[in-house]
Amino acid sequence: MPPPYRPIRPPGRPDVRAGGGQPPTTGRRGLTGRLDRYQRRHPGAGFPLAVVYKFVDDQGTFLTAMITYYGFLSLFPLLLLLTSILGFALHDDPQLQEQVLDSALSRFPVLGQQLAENVQSLRGSTVAVVVGALGALYGSLGVVQAAQNAFNKVWAVPRGERPSPVKARLLSLVMLIVLGLGLVLSTVLSGLTTVAERIGDTEIGAGLRVAALVASVALNVGLLAVAFRLLTARSVRTRDVLPGAVAAALGWQLLQAAGTYYLATMLSGSTATYGLFGVVLGLLVWIYLAALTVVFCAEVNAVRARRLWPRSLLSPFTDDVHLTRGDREAYESYAETERHKGFETVEVDFDQPPPEEDKPRRRWRGRRPH
């Protein structure tokens, strides 16, 4: 039987366990050392740093870019499908058709108003319905699939424990149904906002606007909490995902307000060509920031639930550093994520003694995939 595989130690790397060489010394003194000790002792500084480090370790920008790609790809077929169906169903009532389009598209602050103003030029078409349905299904499933991959990466779910391609797409369809129900409720909330605008600056109008805003945030919190739990192939508790869901919902509300402001001020009075590029680029940036908010808030949930902080200040930049318990558990989870088979074993070892300054903590282990 051949000897077991042993990783070769890079030249110049001392084996601290065997007594060879000296323990890491980088960052112990000077300003860097003081900052490191401060953020380890104060969760207000150490927790955000740990979230940023894990986001970078998980390649969060690439996960966000994949969601953005499918989101942008699915948007236009969805709009084509929506307008074509309304062209068939509401052909005899153009005024009602325009009102329905306006309320449904109010969730897209950069593009909604532009398309709603030109909806009269769109008519029902069988070809448009088929093309729109196929394109919307492909892009929407891609969005949810990309979100599944992102959440599983964030929660360090081994590849061998993730859903099969068939089950993953069934979960995506379930999530799309939930999002569709959320869109219906969102349309109702948009109707409340329209009523409040017609009433004007009265107490009743102000109360309706506040109620619609609170209800919209609560709806987004519920949808995000369901997405965080349903699309993660490891059972996580609602209280583990609720903080990130609340933060992401508030972030979405700010992005919606920013998109509305951008449309009303930056593009008002612009030429048709400039306005077209401004709308497309603004929409692309808006989708990216919305996806970035969701992925980053998912990292907040994972770091908080698994207690992956504090981290060493210099751990992403050098090997000559003392790893904290949060560092070690994070790096162990990264290796465990790449386990492809249930009968495959991944073991992680570090060439330095365990940290003595960190108090022992309970190791978080999620339950098996649901």
Image (cartoon, rainbow, N blue to C red):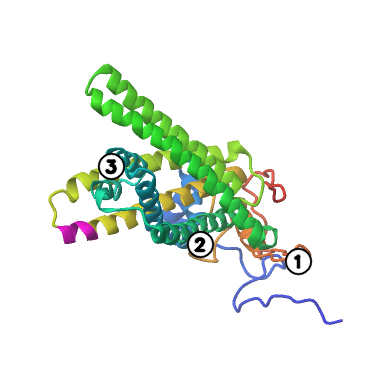
Residue 62: image x %, image y %? 46, 63
Q: Nearer the viewer, mark 3 or mark 2?
A: 3
Q: What residue is drawn where x is 58% and y is 48%?
A: 174
Q: Which residue is mark 2?
A: 26
Number of disc labels: 3
Residue at screen point 71% across, 65% down: 17
Up the image or down, 12 lies above or below 280; here it is: below
The nearer-to-camera label among 1 and 2 is 1
- Report the disc number at residue 344: 1
Q: Residue furthest top?
A: 203
Q: Residue 173: say if magenta.
A: no
Q: Amino acid at mark 2?
A: Thr
| Image side of residue 175 versus residue 211, left or right | right
Q: Main secondary structure of the magenta part?
A: helix
Mark 1 vs mark 2: which is more N-terminal? Answer: 2
Residue topped by disc 3: 94
Decide if residue 284 is in sight here: yes
Kind of residue indicated by mark 1: Glu
Residue at image position (38%, 32%) is 189
Q: Position of residue 244 (x, y in %)?
A: 50, 42
Does label 3 or label 1 sit earlier along the sequence?
3
Q: Nearer the viewer, residue 265 or 355?
A: 265
User: In the shown orientation, is residue 196 left or right of residue 75?
Assistant: left
Disc 1 secondary structure class: loop
User: What segment carries the magenta color?
Assistant: 272-277
